[in-house]
Amino acid sequence: MEVLVILVPLALSLGFVGLLGFLWSLKSGQYDDLDGAAWRAIADDQPVSDRGHDVVETHQ
């Protein structure tokens, strides 16, 4: 039971640090453009003709 004297304040402090990190990310605008990141992930930046040298061929 004496371990709870260490674990409970540790858990509360880690939760507080996580909350501060989340509030900082809200304040700094990390969640302002949620759709832009999704579209950038599927955006086709390279032309089709330039993709040939990036493909890794496997030989069996």
Image: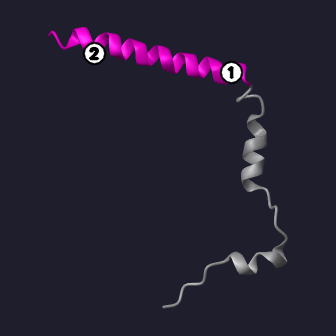
Query: Which amino acid does the dot numbered 1 rest on?
Result: Leu
Badge 1 local density, few (<14 within 10 Å), some, or many (20+)? few
* Residue furthest left as drawn: 1
> Toward which corner of the image does residue 28 lie, by quadrant?
top right
Query: Which amino acid does the dot numbered 2 rest on?
Result: Leu
Name the residue located 59 percent from the left edge and 21 percent from the top edge.
22
Give the CA separation, mark 2 to mark 1: 29 Å
Q: Which residue is mark 1?
A: 26
Q: Is residue 24 left or right of residue 20?
A: right
Q: Is residue 44 magenta?
A: no
> In front: 53, or 38?
53
Q: Position of residue 11 (x, y in %)?
A: 36, 16
Q: Is residue 18 left or right of residue 46?
A: left
Query: As displayed, is residue 14 above or below residue 42?
Result: above
Q: Is residue 20 magenta?
A: yes
Q: Position of residue 44 (x, y in %)?
A: 80, 61
The image's mark for residue 11 is: none
- Magenta stretch bounds: 1-28
Q: Which element type, helix, strand or loop, lies under badge 2?
A: helix
Q: Which element type, helix, strand or loop, lies under badge 1?
A: helix
Sequence order check: which comes first, mark 2 or mark 1?
A: 2
Q: Main secondary structure of the magenta part?
A: helix
Name the residue located 74 percent from the left edge and 43 percent from the top edge.
37
The scheme the figure's colours follow is one colour
Q: Which residue is mark 2?
A: 7
> Toward which corner of the image does residue 10 lie, by quadrant?
top left
Badge 2 local density, few (<14 within 10 Å), some, or many (20+)? few
Name the residue located 30 percent from the left edge and 11 percent from the top edge.
8
Query: As displayed, is residue 47 above or below residue 19?
Result: below
* Residue furthest bottom as drawn: 60
Q: Position of residue 2 (x, y in %)?
A: 16, 9
